[in-house]
Amino acid sequence: MRRRTRIAAAGATAVAAAAVTATVLTATNLMNATSNGPAVGQHRPGDGVVLGEAADHLPSTTAVDWVTYADHVVVVSAVAERRIPPSRQELDRGEGVIGRQVTLKIDKVLWSRDGAARPAPKTWDYNAFGWQFTGGAVDAPRKMAMHERPRVEPGHSYIMAMVWEEARCAPGDAPEPARWRGLGEGSEIPYDAGIIGNGELEGRTHKTAKARKAPAPAQASASAAGVNAADAALEERLAGQAADLLAAELKAARPTAKKQFAASARAAADGC
């Protein structure tokens, strides 16, 4: 399982969620950041993966986060991917990003919000981090991934919380089509072989043995972490378990009032 530096503090989650589009926060001079694209984080020695840091799209750590902001929680299999070519400007510069879109097959719906705008789809075209190239070596790029997040690669399974977002047409910005999106770091969980935490993370495969027949109680887990039970991180407590236990937690959780973040408010006002 991943080691979190922000396990479940409600205030920190809200601050992270204010960035509705994942924007990398730490960068080196491997590639210049722009206001509309990611900057590259540190290069992990030994396997060629470039890691970045990002703010969460929406609160995503706890069961309360999931049932408040998600429309559905699903088990998915990554079945295919396609490359999105870099721009002509990047090619001329000799450095840039090759994008990636992953086709996810929805294997099972674990939970759905009452009144969700749309039913869960059969497949999901998921925008994922791709590759970064420098020195004009577009045919030999390095993998990009977010720190402590799955890269989402074909051949692996995941549990994901997803939300439908309407199209955004804010003046001065490029239009964004309506689409399914994830919530953030805490709502993308490796799930190979039906085991929470088992599978791909940061482009590597991690094995998690099934060690317990029941998860640690929320109250005990929260007390150990110094947070309220409602803020206990699902992923850490349920590591090594099957998805039915996570589904039970979601059914028992009660949503809170949604916070209105700046970009979401603008999107609702602008429409398309």
Image: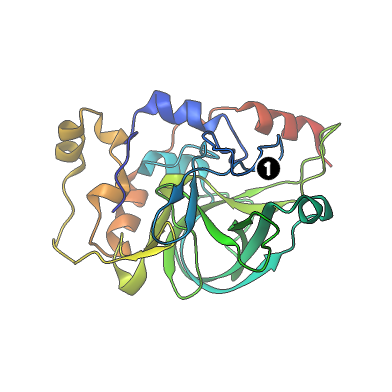
Which of the 4 quarters of the picture holds residue 129?
Answer: bottom right
For the point 79% across and 55% down, the residue is: 87
Where does the image place residue 76, in percent across and percent down from the top left?
Answer: 48, 68
Q: Nearer the viewer, residue 271 or 30?
A: 30
Q: Nearer the viewer, residue 200 or 264?
A: 200
Q: Answer left or right for 93 relative to 143.
A: right
Which of the 4 quarters of the picture holds residue 174?
Answer: top right
Where does the image place residue 120, in percent across and percent down from the top left?
Answer: 57, 62
Colour basis: rainbow
For the point 30% across and 61% down, the residue is: 196
Tally of marks: 1
For the point 66% across and 62% down, the residue is: 137
Q: Answer left or right for 46 relative to 120.
A: left
Q: Which residue is mark 1?
A: 37
Q: Answer left or right for 52 relative to 249.
A: right
Quadrant for the C terminus in the image: top right
In the displayed structure, would residue 170 be above or below residue 66? above
Q: Taking the image as drawn, is residue 116 in sight?
A: yes
Q: Answer left or right for 251 relative to 223.
A: right
For the point 66% across and 70% down, the residue is: 82
Quadrant for the N terminus in the image: bottom left
Where does the image place residue 70, in percent across and percent down from the top left?
Answer: 51, 47
The amino acid sitting under disc 1 is Gly
Q: Residue furthest top?
A: 11
In the displayed structure, would residue 232 be above or below residue 127? above
Where does the image place residue 132, in percent across and percent down from the top left?
Answer: 61, 55
Q: Taking the image as drawn, is residue 111 in sight?
A: no
In the displayed structure, would residue 221 be above or below residue 262? below
Within 10 Å of disc 1 (Cα), the crowding (few <14, some 14-19, many 20+) is few
Q: Nearer the viewer, residue 52 or 141?
A: 141
